Image (cartoon, helix red, strand yellow):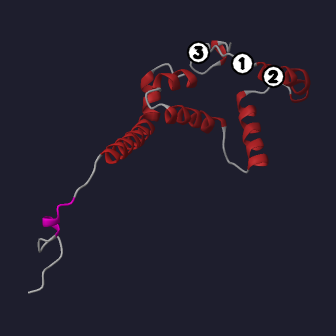
């Protein structure tokens, strides 16, 4: 559990952590925390930016990572606004929507077009075309007759 007093929105967050992550956190607390000391939010953000630049050549910070997490969730399901609200810790859904409503619109449009094209392909495989010979011989559509 992340205590409410330590979070921006003063809401406690309960998180299930897999055993590998627990092992890594225990190692950090036992080995690295004594060396680096307690990291304030600002110090943690700075270290993260430095690490991302050093090892990935990316200029990215923790705030951008939050937005990436929100976008990734909405890419998988445009209707998951409530999940994004919970993950990002927003008190009000309006806050989440103000940042991510455009993402939802784009993703929803992309999903709609994908479904439309799937339906179109399914319909086209069931349609058979027959062309009437008389239609082909008309002057405008088919072979023009020389006079």
Q: CA distance from mark 3 to mark 1?
A: 21 Å
For label 1, the residue is 17
Helix, strand or loop status at disc 2: helix
Q: Residue at x 62, y 15 (%)?
A: 13
Q: Are marks 3 and 2 in contact (CB under 8 Å)?
A: no
Estimate the x, y position of residue 139 in percent, counting from the top left. Answer: 11, 74
Position of 52 with respect to 140 (left or right) is: right
Q: Are marks 1 and 2 in contact (CB under 8 Å)?
A: yes
Residue 135 covered by magenta stretch: yes
Estimate the x, y position of residue 110 in percent, counting from the top left. Answer: 42, 43
The quarter of the picture where the N terminus appears is: top right
For label 3, the residue is 10
Q: Residue furthest bottom?
A: 147
Relative to the observer, which residue lies in front, 140 or 46?
140
Q: Determine the image quadrant of residue 102.
A: top left
For label 2, the residue is 25
Q: Nearer the viewer, mark 3 or mark 1?
A: 1
Q: Is residue 65 above or below residue 127?
A: above
Q: Determine the image quadrant of residue 28.
A: top right
Helix, strand or loop status at disc 3: loop
């Amino acid at each position: 559990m992340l205590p409410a007093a330590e979070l921006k929105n003063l809401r406690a967050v309960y998180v299930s952590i897999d055993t590998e992550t627990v092992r890594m956190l225990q190692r950090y607390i036992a080995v690295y925390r004594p060396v680096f000391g307690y990291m304030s939010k600002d110090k943690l953000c700075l270290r993260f930016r430095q690490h991302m630049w050093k090892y990935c050549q990316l200029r990215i910070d923790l705030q951008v990572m939050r937005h990436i997490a929100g976008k990734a969730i909405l890419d998988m399901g445009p209707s998951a606004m409530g999940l994004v609200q919970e993950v990002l810790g927003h008190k009000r859904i309006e806050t989440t929507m103000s940042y991510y409503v455009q993402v939802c619109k784009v993703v929803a449009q992309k999903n709609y077009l994908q479904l439309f094209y799937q339906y179109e392909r399914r319909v086209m495989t069931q349609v058979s075309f027959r062309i009437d010979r008389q239609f082909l011989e008309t002057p405008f559509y088919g072979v023009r007759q020389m006079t």
